[in-house]
Image (cartoon, rainbow, N blue to C red):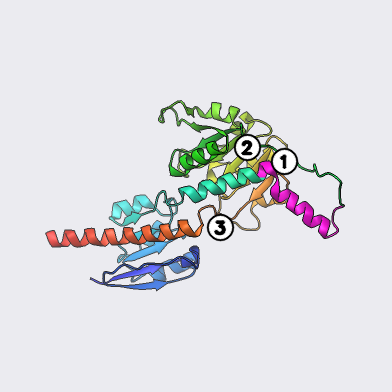
């Protein structure tokens, strides 16, 4: 058969990334962006859908009887109603682990920025140049700390978490991970309460599940050191953002850096924007994953998942 493949949001990959289309018979349609109310119309004849970030929910999928597979060019599967897909026999494939290096590096860059204050001091120099601040003989406007010797606590146990552990240890940080109620074994794993109380930097590197939703809430924030940093490059919903905002404004946290928020794509009315001028806050727009190297690997694996699916289906048909 000839498969009809629709890429719903190819603007989600950079222009330098090549899409190496499969060599089995197929048609391919690209859309730079698809709004939720356009999903059904654009997928009505599709047998395979490709998406970087567009949610695909049961009420839409029920109207797409021709659809056989969803190839997700991302790791998290929370944007697709997987239970419905399993019940229907609709294959869902994701790409775990493609960005372990790039997300870990981005996480470390946020830690560096909050501790070394490079962005703050650059902005100060910009303000001086523009006449919004005065020249000084000595610049001690922001607290600067070394990473070496600080305790990094990581919530997560996947490739990103372990790559972050590796590179953080390379610059002299001491690293521990959340032991997930004893599921993970080893001397570097500690209970969550101990991780919160001892970490100078807490990094979220885990997926969003029913178990991790608002894992870091007001009670957990209250356990942290008052000058601790909170970094989230995992999923926004792992942190109760309202409690986090309050803790930072009340100086019960030393700093916060986010690459993800609970409701994405982020809108201008998002409450986290009330922190945007706070000197101890950083926000990047969910780009930790997006190095050109990582995106090329991502697309190569997303296409490989499609080829694997079609090959397996053809094999079943041949055996029957």
Residue 215 seen in the figure:
no
Judged from the image, the secondary structure of the residue bearing numbered disc 3 is loop
Answer yes or no: do the residues labelled 1 and 2 have beta carbons within 8 Å? Answer: no
User: Mark 1 sits on what residue?
Assistant: 249
Quadrant of the image occupied by residue 8: bottom left
Q: Residues within 10 Å of mark 3 (few under 14, many from 20)?
A: few
What's the distance in space between the residues labelled 1 and 2, CA to CA?
24 Å
Using residue 290 as the reference point, say whether residue 64 is left or right of it: left
**At 34% from the left edge and 55% from the top edge, which residue is drawn?**
92
Task: Return the disc, 3 or 2, that comes first in the chain's sequence.
Answer: 2
Point out the stretch of residues depicted in magenta: 114-134
User: Mark 2 sits on what residue?
Assistant: 147
Q: Is residue 306 above or below residue 278?
A: below
Quadrant of the image occupied by residue 58: bottom left
Q: Position of residue 231 (x, y in %)?
A: 59, 42
User: Mark 3 sits on what residue?
Assistant: 265
Q: Residues within 10 Å of mark 2 (few under 14, many from 20)?
A: many
Q: Give the number of the mark in front: 1 or 2.
A: 2
**At 64% from the left edge and 40% from the top edge, which residue is drawn?**
244
| Tally of numbered tags | 3
Q: Position of residue 178 (x, y in %)?
A: 49, 32
Q: Quadrant of the N terminus?
A: bottom left
**At 61% from the left edge and 29% from the top edge, which residue is drawn?**
223
Q: Position of residue 155 (x, y in %)?
A: 51, 37
Residue 3 seen in the figure:
yes
What's the distance in space between the residues labelled 3 and 1, CA to CA?
24 Å
Using residue 77 as the reference point, say whether residue 237 is left or right of it: right
Q: Give the number of the mark in front: 3 or 2.
A: 2
Q: Residues within 10 Å of mark 1 (few under 14, many from 20)?
A: some
Task: Return the disc, 1 or 2, that comes first in the chain's sequence.
Answer: 2
């Amino acid at each position: 058969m000839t498969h009809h493949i629709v890429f719903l949001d190819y603007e989600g990959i950079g222009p330098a990334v090549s899409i190496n289309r499969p060599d089995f018979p197929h048609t391919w349609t690209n859309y730079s962006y698809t709004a939720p109310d356009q999903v059904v119309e654009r997928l009505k004849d599709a047998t395979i859908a490709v998406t970087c970030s567009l949610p695909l929910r049961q009420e839409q999928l029920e109207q797409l009887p021709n659809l056989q597979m969803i190839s997700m060019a991302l790791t998290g599967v929370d944007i697709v109603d997987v239970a419905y897909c399993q019940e229907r026999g609709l294959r869902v494939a994701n790409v775990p682990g493609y960005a372990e290096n790039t997300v870990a590096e981005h996480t470390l860059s946020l830690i560096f920025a909050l501790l070394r204050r490079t962005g703050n001091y650059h902005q100060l120099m910009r303000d001086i140049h523009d006449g919004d601040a005065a020249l000084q003989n000595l610049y001690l406007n922001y607290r600067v700390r070394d990473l070496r010797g600080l305790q990094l606590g990581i919530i997560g146990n996947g490739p990103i978490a372990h790559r972050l552990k590796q590179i953080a240890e390379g610059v002299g940080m001491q690293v521990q991970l959340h032991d997930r109620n004893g599921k993970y074994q080893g001397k570097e794993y500690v209970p969550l309460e101990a991780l919160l109380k001892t970490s100078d930097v807490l990094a979220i590197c885990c997926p969003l599940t029913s178990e991790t939703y608002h894992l870091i809430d007001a009670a957990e924030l209250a356990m942290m050191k008052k000058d601790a940093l909170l970094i989230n490059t995992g999923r926004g919903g792992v942190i109760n953002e309202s409690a986090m905002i309050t803790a930072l404004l009340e100086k019960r946290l030393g700093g916060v850096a986010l690459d993800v928020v609970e409701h994405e794509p982020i809108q201008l009315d998002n409450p986290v924007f009330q922190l945007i001028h706070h000197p101890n806050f950083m926000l990047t727009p969910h780009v930790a994953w997006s190095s050109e190297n990582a995106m090329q690997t991502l697309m190569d694996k997303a296409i490989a998942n499609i080829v694997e699916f079609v090959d397996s289906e053809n094999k079943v048909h041949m055996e029957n």
